[in-house]
Amino acid sequence: MENELPDSAEAMEAKATAHALPIGWVALLVGLVVWGLYYLWAYSPWSTGWTQAGELTTTTAAATNITNTVLFTAVPAMVLVALYFAMARRGSAKK
């Protein structure tokens, strides 16, 4: 019975990827940081003068809000689809 797998957690750990982050996590981190910086710049009164009261008085606010809602839904969905296909290609390349 020398061909049995080891029972310890350390022996079952993947040694090749022990210190590397998956590309999906790196992409998520970078995307969140970039989005956070954009959001801070776009909706801060000190940078663009944007206020909630001013948003209610403009007539193009509804069109902008609809566009932003669609973008904030569609862009993450496209990123998820791209990550899915990238991971599927990665999995099939290893076989």
Image (cartoon, grey):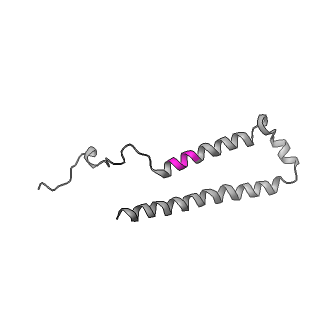
Q: Residue furthest toward the front?
A: 93
Counting from the top left corner in percent of width and height, residue 85 is at 50, 63
Viewer-side residue, 77 vs 31: 31
Quadrant where the C terminus sits is: bottom left
Q: Position of residue 79 (x, y in %)?
A: 57, 58
**Which residue is found at the position 54% from the left and 49% from the top?**
28
Residue 75 falls in which quadrant of the image?
Answer: bottom right
Question: Residue 76 appears at what percent x and percent y?
Answer: 60, 56
Q: Look at the magenta stretch and give its main secondary structure.
A: helix
- For image coordinates 63% across by 44% down, the residue present is 34
27 is within the stretch colored magenta: yes
Number of numbered discs visible in the structure rendering: 0
Instruction: Decide if residue 66 is on the left or right side of residue 84.
Output: right
Residue 56, position in %: x, y? 85, 47
Tell me if 43 is positioned left or right of 81 in this view.
right
- Which contiguous range is marked in magenta? 26-30
In the current view of this chain or complex, which residue is farthest to the left? 1
Quadrant of the rendered image containing residue 89: bottom left
Looking at this view, is 21 or 11 the one in front? 21
The quadrant of the rendering that contains the N terminus is bottom left
- Could you tell me which residue is drawn at 59 percent across and 61 percent down? 78
- Does 80 sit left or right of 19 as displayed? right
